[in-house]
Amino acid sequence: MNATNANPFVPSFGGVLANAPRTSCTWCGQSVPNITWSAPSTDRGSPVTAYRVLMGPDEATLVEVARVSDVRQYVKRGLENGLAYYFSVLAVNLNGEGPKAPVRPATPLGVPSAPL
């Protein structure tokens, strides 16, 4: 929220931020999540110029791992099997960053061990 406006999604300079994108996560192979998302339901009159892909070990400590402008997909390689990872995406337009999409957990499980 800013000092001149009670609505946290309207910056003080008058522009309106895009809504949050919708996300999903599928697995492309061992330890490789494929994060995909759709455009926000509305850009609020200013086209989306980029998407920020966020990842972290929990919902509270997400950091940017990619910033893309012409695709709605991100593949994160090299994750450790058995550890939980959390992902989210947010849309950016000329007015700033919109809200994060709901955080999605993903835990790569890897391949099974050899039979006994």
Image: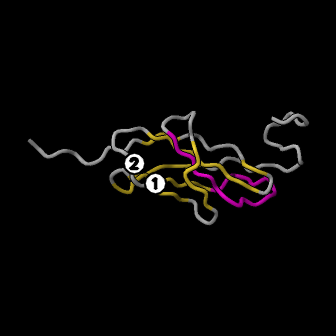
Q: How crowded is the residue under tag 2: few (<14 C-alpha within 10 Å), some, or many (20+)?
A: some
The C terminus lies in quadrant: top left
Which region is colored magenta? 39-56
Q: Is residue 80 magenta?
A: no
Q: Position of residue 91 (x, y in %)?
A: 68, 52
Mark drawn on residue 15: none
> What is the x, y in percent for residue 100?
64, 43
Q: Few, some or many C-alpha atoms within 10 Å of disc 1 (few <14, some 14-19, many ≥20)?
A: some
* Residue 2 locus on image (x, y percent): 84, 36
Q: Quadrant of residue 28?
A: bottom left
Amino acid at the residue labelled 1: Lys
The quadrant holding residue 68 is bottom right
Instruction: Kindly give the residue lying farthest to the right in the view shown.
Output: 4
User: Considering depth in this image, is 69 or 24 the residue closer to the camera?
Assistant: 69
Q: Position of residue 53 (x, y in %)?
A: 58, 51
At 53% from the left and 59% from the top, the residue drawn is: 73
Instruction: Locate residue 43 relative to residue 78 in the image: left or right.
Output: right
Judging by the rendered image, the residue that carries numbered circle 1 is: 76
Return the residue nearer the eye: 61 or 115.
61
Measure the C-alpha gap from mark 2 to mark 1: 7 Å
Question: In the rendered structure, are the residues bearing label 2 and label 1 in contact, judged by CB atoms less than 8 Å apart?
Answer: yes
Is 115 displayed left or right of 40 in the figure? left
Up-down relation of residue 86 to residue 76 (above or below): above
Badge 1 marks a residue whose secondary structure is: loop
73 left or right of 50 in image: left
Looking at the rendered structure, the secondary structure element under dot 2 is loop
| Residue designated by label 2 | 79
